[in-house]
Image: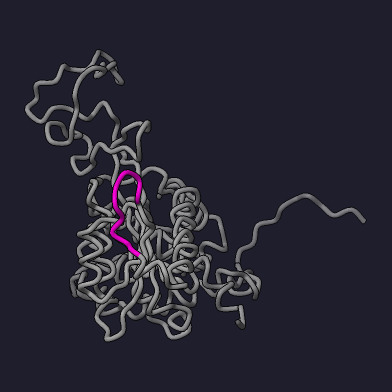
Amino acid sequence: MRGSDQGNGSLFSYVDLEQRVRPDHPLRVIRAIANASLQALSADFDALYSPFGRESIPPERLVRALLLQAFYSIRSERQLVERIEYDLLFRWFVGLGIDEVVWDATTFTKNRDRLLDGDVAAKFLSAVLSQSRVKRLLSSEHFSVDGTLIEAWASPKSFKPKDGSGAPPGPGRNGERDFHGERRTNDSHASSTDPDARLYRKGRGKEAKLSFMGHALMENRNGLIVGAVATRASGHAERLAAIALIEPHAERPQSITLGGDKNYDTKDFVMELRERAVTPHVAQNDTNRRSAIDGRTTRHPGYAVSMRIRKRIEEAFGWAKTVAGLRKMRHRGLPKVDWQFTLAMTAYNLIRLPKLLADPA
């Protein structure tokens, strides 16, 4: 017998979102870890909100929604809110009931500054890593560090002289701006759209773009990110950020190792690592110069292991740019860029944890 195509509305709904998500869905493990981590930050959330007045959207729901934005490559927060409205899986993960009203997209804008002031992204990353079943996956002795360029949300046309002497753009909404032959440097020019962005190029022969730098510290056992920070783009930013990221892990009686590429092969950086009892497993840069890494380090078999494993940190950067939407920043200003980058690194850890926790080895 052929079924009828006529739809009938229901006066009451008996849909249980918990039953709509299959038991082996990867988001179940991720949601349990995220909820436990957010519960550990409850006191920090209380300090960010006033004890009086109208109740706000719970910050835990906002953070879980932003994780979904990274997992499913949703371009904007307006599209994210629309997806939560009709997607039962998204409602279940965020914590909304089937009949609850979804908040407006401007709620993210209003609460972002509050979450920035509380340094919630960095605390959330630490809370995820401090859980007992996640902590056993981490190495406390061997690490790798690297940095990546992140394109700023600013046009090259906005890079103008600081003294205001530049020629005005042509007429129209997107007027022509001819800057060929003009010497433009970060000392004399700044972006009128995002003053924190810096003109930087990845290497010789590459084009210069307004960019930030994202830096990540990876443990070498399973390739999880244990530290993340974003800085202004400069030639010294990678080494300065590496010292700041490894500092909390260097306070131990046994020495640890830190892998890195050729950009970290400088005399000052290697000396600072050794002063902190950190063995520099840095790739040798001996092109027309003398490397700061000699046979005392390279003769050990652990050096070759670090050289092989350190490249896995590029997987985190690649996932963040292709999936989590970091190919180009959605926000302006270094604090917001740092927030988005750190949250993306946390999302990368969460997306890998279901398989790692299921592996008995």
* Residue 306 placement (x, y as % from top left): 44, 67
Along the line of sight, which residue is nearer the eye, 191 or 43?
Answer: 191
In the depicted structure, whether residue 10 falls above or below residue 172: below
Magenta stretch, main secondary structure class: loop
Q: Residue at x 29, y 16 (%)?
A: 176
Along the line of sight, which residue is nearer the eye, 27 or 2?
Answer: 27
Please indicate, yes or no, whether residue 157 appears anywhere in the rendered image. yes
* Residue 103 placement (x, y as % from top left): 38, 57
In the depicted structure, whether residue 98 falls above or below residue 214: below
Q: Residue at x 36, y 61 (%)?
A: 282
Q: Which residues are magenta?
A: 286-294
Give yes or no for residue 89 being in the magenta stretch.
no
Along the line of sight, which residue is nearer the eye, 138 or 280?
Answer: 280
Q: Is residue 259 left or right of residue 290?
A: right
- Give the color scheme: rainbow, by chain, secondary structure or one colour: one colour
The total number of labels drawn is 0
